[in-house]
Amino acid sequence: MIIFNNVTKKYGDNVGLIDASVHIKSGDFVFLVGPSGAGKTTFIRLILKEIDPDSGRIILAGKDITKIGRREIPAIRQKIGMVFQDFRLLEKKTVYENVAFAMEVLHKSKREIRERVPYVLDLVDIKDKANRYPAELSAGEQQRVGIARALVNKPRVLICDEPTGNLDPITAMDIMALLEQINIRGTTVLMVTHAKDIVDKMNKRVVAIDQGHIVRDEEGSYGYKQQGTEDDLYVPGFTSFTDDPIKARTMQLDPELTESIRGKTISMDPPTGDELYSILDEYLDGGDDSYE
């Protein structure tokens, strides 16, 4: 469904993505995680054809979108539905009108709109709010409208950019249950998030980006995984320490290892409190890196 093949994108001296290769199959549910500035937004903008890569290929639904002209971009974007953190609803339109508008801009017939909109509103369990305005809805209800709008044109891929960021924990999990049901029905879901608790509970595929590099691609948690009596702690920008002589707790950093296996895993007995932060500061060299 989505293939990045050795994709690089830079903004002058700033890194977007570096030699990124990812294959997201049709029907996958993928979390895209990483610190601020890691390259997640670049990844999404490349899929939407808002920017072009400096090198590499991007395949969307079997088509190489790095080679298409500007006139073909609208057709490509019709294959993608977008869900946003801030909902982005039209305040002066009702729920029904907000969802219908997404079809109207594509010049769908009135008959298609009358048939499709109620169906999608029912799918996201908000059909009874069809005549309400966004200001009359809870945050969770507004996000359901946003999801309905993203789904109404039958996209192949649903991209969710921090869709639970403005929601309380219970409502957030309700939205995640809805997204999972949408995925089960066949829609590929790619979700950008910093919500570690949600990623851990969902136990889906996680693609982690750090400083433009794909540093992790596997099913499981956001970054913590129990292994016997030790924890594996994923911290963006860190180096992998797995052998006893160079465990992180010994503070014996081999400079030759920092670049070759950067962004992997630290193996240590779980530190606590000030001890944890002193370890983090040591390996981050006092930098401004973000870590969770």
Image (cartoon, rainbow, N blue to C red):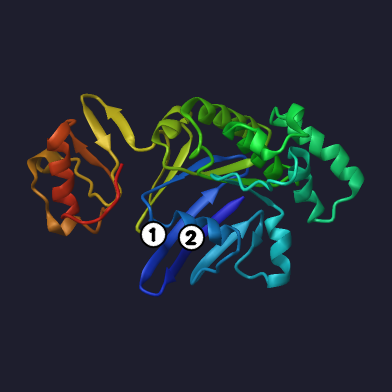
Does any portion of residue 50 appear in the rendered image? yes
Return the residue at label 1.
Answer: 212
Q: Residue at x 58, y 52 (%)?
A: 2
Q: Earlier in the sequence, mark 1 or mark 2?
A: 2
> Could you tell me how many numbered marks the image carries?
2
Q: Are marks 1 and 2 in contact (CB under 8 Å)?
A: yes
Q: Dot 2 surroundings within 10 Å: few (below 14), some, or many (20 or more)?
A: many
**Relative height, residue 166 to residue 55 (above, below):** above
Q: Position of residue 191 (x, y in %)?
A: 52, 43
Q: Residue at x 72, y 46 (%)?
A: 92
Tell me the amino acid under the disc marked 1: Gly
Q: Is residue 49 left or right of residue 165?
A: right
**Relative height, residue 65 to residue 288 (above, below):** below
Q: Residue at x 63, y 56 (%)?
A: 60
Return the residue at label 2.
Answer: 42
Q: Is residue 139 left or right of residue 219?
A: right
Identify which residue, 256 or 133, lies in the foreground: 133
Q: Which residue reaches farthest bottom?
A: 12
Q: Position of residue 165 (x, y in %)?
A: 48, 40
- Image quadrant occupied by the C terminus: top left
Tell me the amino acid under the disc marked 2: Thr
Q: Dot 1 surroundings within 10 Å: few (below 14), some, or many (20 or more)?
A: many
The quarter holding residue 244 reads: top left
Q: Residue at x 69, y 65 (%)?
A: 73
Q: Position of residue 161 (x, y in %)?
A: 53, 47
Does any portion of residue 271 appear in the rendered image? no
The quarter holding residue 48 reads: bottom right
